[in-house]
Amino acid sequence: MTPASLDLSVVIPVYNGGKTIRRCLLSLHEALTRAGISREILVIDDASRDRSAKVVDGLTREIPGLRLLRHKKNLGCGPARNFGVAEARGEFLWFVDADDVVSVAGFAGLDFKTETSGCDVLFFRYAHVLEKNGSVLPWDDYDGRIFMACPKSGFSAEDYPAVIVSSHALWFKWFRRDSVSRAGMVFPSTYVNSDHPFTIANLCAARRMRFLDRELYVYRFDASSISRVLDERRLSFLSALECTEQWLRERGIDGGRLAAFHISKAHLLLLHFRHSGPHWESHLRGVMESYLASLDREMVLRLAENELLLPELKARLLEIHRLDPVLTSKTLALRSSLGKLWQRLRGNFTVSASQPTLS
């Protein structure tokens, strides 16, 4: 098999994941084999202190295309993923977590070439399972709302900015490797949310995206995982946000995509504030309030009229900027009506201008 023939490069960072990595890899092997997807599976052992590397090394004899890469020093999830991207040869990249599994049944009859044709990013459904008791939660309402309403024939973030507000989790997306190179964003070395800059940048840069209404992934929620840390390491998410904002500034991203980013940022700030613990609560409240106060009036109105902004954030945003909710609602309704009228007038003018004239 030549490198050019690989459909997919699966990148899996692992740190002390000896108890789950075997389950993850076997599910991947079965699912991708069932769909006839040519692949390589790159496991980056981030200097684990348990049996992770030994488990993976043992499976290289059972799973074709499985490669074990190793960091001598623990560098974190972001650098591990960067290592995997640098080594990848597949047309698409898939970032999988070592404690999750693939929904094998979802791959039955999947035509990879057809589904990914012309796409820079392909999204799909996922299941949400509680590790503690195995109960399955419904597909995330927020992501579900966004993707079930997306244009079925494909879209970009410019014509469907709501995609930027969706979860920045990597595992329910396939990224075209050439598009990732064009976007030029690497994963930062932050302890949490290193996926946020990478995801936002690649969604903004993608020329075309599609949603595949198939469940291909099972996210297993473990309350002890790294995303639930309650010490100062949690604050590294602020550095991740700065990486995203720097990328957006350098590329002049504005309009609906910028507004969608601000909603994503506000939601992330609120999430960390809610789960930071009493020691960091006051600090993060101050960060969140300062951020909301820094938005200019036009961006405040853009956010206030977007139904994806959580109601409590909308209420606080209007309060900080001393805007009356009732009056603001009427103003936004008038803006919307005028916008629709302008679109109709533009459409009529375009049609009229294109008609042949009689001489």
Image (cartoon, grey):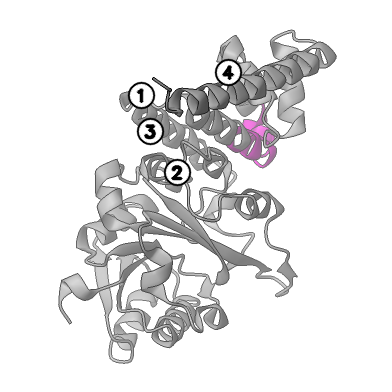
Q: Quadrant of residue 340?
A: top right
Q: Are marks 3 and 4 in contact (CB under 8 Å)?
A: no
Inspect the magenta stretch and tell me whether residue 208 lies in it: no
Disc number for residue 252 = 1
Of badges 4 and 2, nearer the viewer stands 2
Q: In front here: 278 or 223? A: 223
Q: CA distance from mark 4 to mark 2?
A: 21 Å
User: Is residue 25 positioned above or below 162 on the image?
Assistant: below
Residue type at mark 2 is: Ser
Q: Which residue is mark 4?
A: 299
User: Is residue 209 positioned above or below 20 on the image?
Assistant: above
User: Is residue 201 positioned above or below 94 on the image?
Assistant: above
For numbered disc 2, what is the local secondary structure?
Answer: loop
Residue type at mark 3 is: Cys
Instruction: State the residue at coordinates (36%, 67%).
Output: 48
Residue type at mark 1 is: Gly
Q: Which residue is mark 3?
A: 243
